[in-house]
Amino acid sequence: MHMGMSARGRKITSQFGHADIGVSRYFALYLAQAGWVALGLYLYSQAIWPSTCTPHGLVEIYMCSGQLADNRGWVEAALMTWLWTTPLLLALAGMELLRRMGILRSDR
């Protein structure tokens, strides 16, 4: 007799995302974050900015980042991608923290 979904197939929303993180995963997360920042610093130090736009601050970096592709180098393309994905990753991490603190509920 078939009783519907098995216990393995059911989604228990009250337990989602609240498990403790093991020590190895905790260090892996921080290592990944440090690697992401190191990658950005490396790309920034190796990139050749267009002569029409040489940034001196964070706002100017984002304003000039659209011109990085003009050099057609892989470092500049990677830096532009890194610059525009980092705020999205930070927003997702912030939403996850808010969800874990109970401020942002995932069952809505």
Image: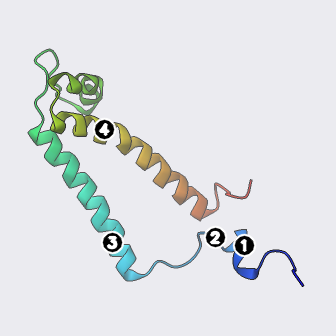
Q: Residues within 10 Å of mark 4 (few under 14, many from 20)?
A: some
Q: Residue at left 59%, top 69%?
A: 17
Q: Residue furthest right?
A: 1
Please name which of the two marks, 3 or 4, marks the residue nearer to the observer. 4
In the rendered image, which residue does mark 2 sit on?
A: 16
Q: Residue at left 30%, top 38%?
A: 81
The amino acid marked with disc number 4 is Thr
The amino acid marked with disc number 3 is Ala
Query: x and y percent of residue 102 in the render?
Result: 64, 62
How far apart are the two marked residues, 2 and 3, measured between alpha carbons? 21 Å
The quadrant where residue 62 appears: top left
- Identify the element where label 1 is drawn: loop
- Which comes sooner in the sequence, label 1 or label 3? 1
How far apart are the two marked residues, 3 and 4, measured between alpha carbons? 23 Å
Where 16 falls versus 80 (above or below)?
A: below
The amino acid marked with disc number 2 is Phe
In the rendered image, which residue does mark 1 sit on?
A: 12
Q: Report if the CB atoms under discs 4 and 2 are less than 8 Å apart.
A: no
Does 102 sit left or right of 53 as displayed? right
In the rendered image, which residue does mark 3 sit on?
A: 28
In the rendered image, which residue does mark 4 sit on?
A: 81
